[in-house]
Image (cartoon, helix red, strand yellow):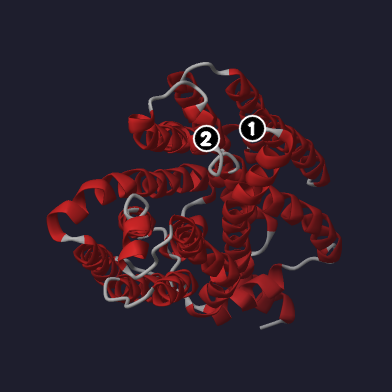
Amino acid sequence: MSTLDTSSADTAVPGYAERNAPYWRRNLVVCVFGSFTTLVSLSMLLPFLPLYVRQLGVSSQAAVIQWSGIAFSATFLGTAATAPIWGRLADRFGRKPMLVRAAIGMAIVMSLIGVAHNVYELVALRLVAGLVGGYASASTVMVGTQAPRERAGWALGILSTGALAGNLVGPLVGGFLPGWIGIRGTFFAGGAMIAVAALATIFVVKEDFNAQRDAKRHVHRASASSSAVRRANAGVVAALLVTAMMVLLANMSIEPIITVYISSLHVDAAHLARVAGAVMACSALGSMLTAARLGSLADRIGSWRVIIGCLLLTGLAMIPQAFVTHWWQLGGLRVVMGMTLAGLLPSIGKLARHSVDESSTGRLLGWLQSAQFSGQVIGPLIGGLIGVHLGLHAVFFATGALLVACAGLAQWARKQEH
């Protein structure tokens, strides 16, 4: 057989997405369930975290607040640090092993948190949960690479809906479960939920993975102009990373000031925490309503159009939040903001799949997850600094301006692809 014939035969070998076409819908269902349960378990400690910190021997109010913030952020710092590594390993060893690793690791660590002896162990275990976990991140890699290109936006939107639902339901579960089984028992229940997801992943998820075959296939598909394509893609990938960070930065920038801001809207002190929690949940509720629809829209009209439109609309939705006079007005605007934010992550994931070859998609999606969690850490820091030095209303103006600027960056990146 000639060299040309060999090249044609290798190119004709089915790619990863084609080989996994029979499995992607079933895998999507398991990934949605697993992302939901793991994020319920991680977020359900929000209502009682200060109580647990106090139970672990921290006495002063200031120290309780400080350690609660450190313990909560530790998981996201861990995930941001290791998501690119797990994405790269997913390209080498397969997507399913990363899901199984994340589920088993999180089930064990979540249970261990329930037997922590002091606040240092709590923080360390929360950090380890981020380092070894990341089921939702691994799910994004699997769904983003297995779903057909024309359905990828919709599939990632459905997955995003499951993750958002977990973040929404988690604090609600954490509000009543400790009253029934105790705080430590709640962590054991969370570990058990993740263990169920681990079993579903092991026995239900199917994957046809062959790293050597895919790498060989893509070597033969490389063209003489590949270096120019890579140079163009570098700018596109950078824009995608910045946009992924902005998703959670925009959502989280108000978190440090939201309770103080709501208290200025004449909310009774006895109901302040409850109202603040409801307003915080409003953005997730809005995103759940539109994530799948906007992902499907990206499949039809193009991801860049959806990204630019969502960034502009979210930026505009930030401004009226600075002028509300009642808490329910803020809640309504946060729902609208969540509805427009929801189109970003599915569209970004779909574009990431087109920006690099199949053998590197997991690595890029891992970096996108890292950028996203970095936004979750940076957002509250920026919001707190602006709120202290420029006033509460300035947080909304600054975040809106950043979103509009990011829309300009996305428009530039869109032109680089043409």
Residue 418 seen in the current view: no
Q: Is residue 9 above or below residue 228?
A: below
Q: Amino acid at mark 1?
A: Leu
Of 388 and 372, nearer the camera is 388
Horizontal relation, residue 120 to residue 395: left or right: left
The quadrant of the image that shows the C terminus is top right
The quadrant in which residue 92 appears is bottom right
Residue 360 horizontal side relative to residue 113, left or right: right
At horizontal 18% and vertical 60% (from top left) the residue drawn is: 182
Distance Cα–Cα, label 2 vs label 1 = 9 Å
Q: Residue pushed farthest top?
A: 325
Looking at the picture, how far across and down is residue 349, in whole percent?
Answer: 57, 51
Which quadrant of the figure contains the N terminus? bottom right
The residue sitting at 37% across, 75% down in the picture is: 118
Q: Residue furthest left?
A: 180
> In the depicted view, which residue is nearer to us: 76 or 120?
120
- Where residue 75 appears, as percent x and y from the top left, is 48, 65
Tell which circle, 2 or 1, labels the residue nearer the N-terminal end: 2
Q: Residues within 10 Å of mark 2 (few under 14, many from 20)?
A: few
The x and y percentages for residue 386 are 70, 41
For the residues labelled 2 and 1, say whether their Cβ atoms are less than 8 Å apart.
Answer: yes
Q: Is residue 372 visible?
A: yes
SS at circle 1: helix
Q: Is residue 373 above or below residue 117?
A: above
Mark identifier at residue 288: none
On residue 260, the disc is 2
Residue that mark 1 sits on: 392
- Residue 86 x, y percent position in the rendering: 53, 73
Q: Amino acid at mark 2?
A: Val
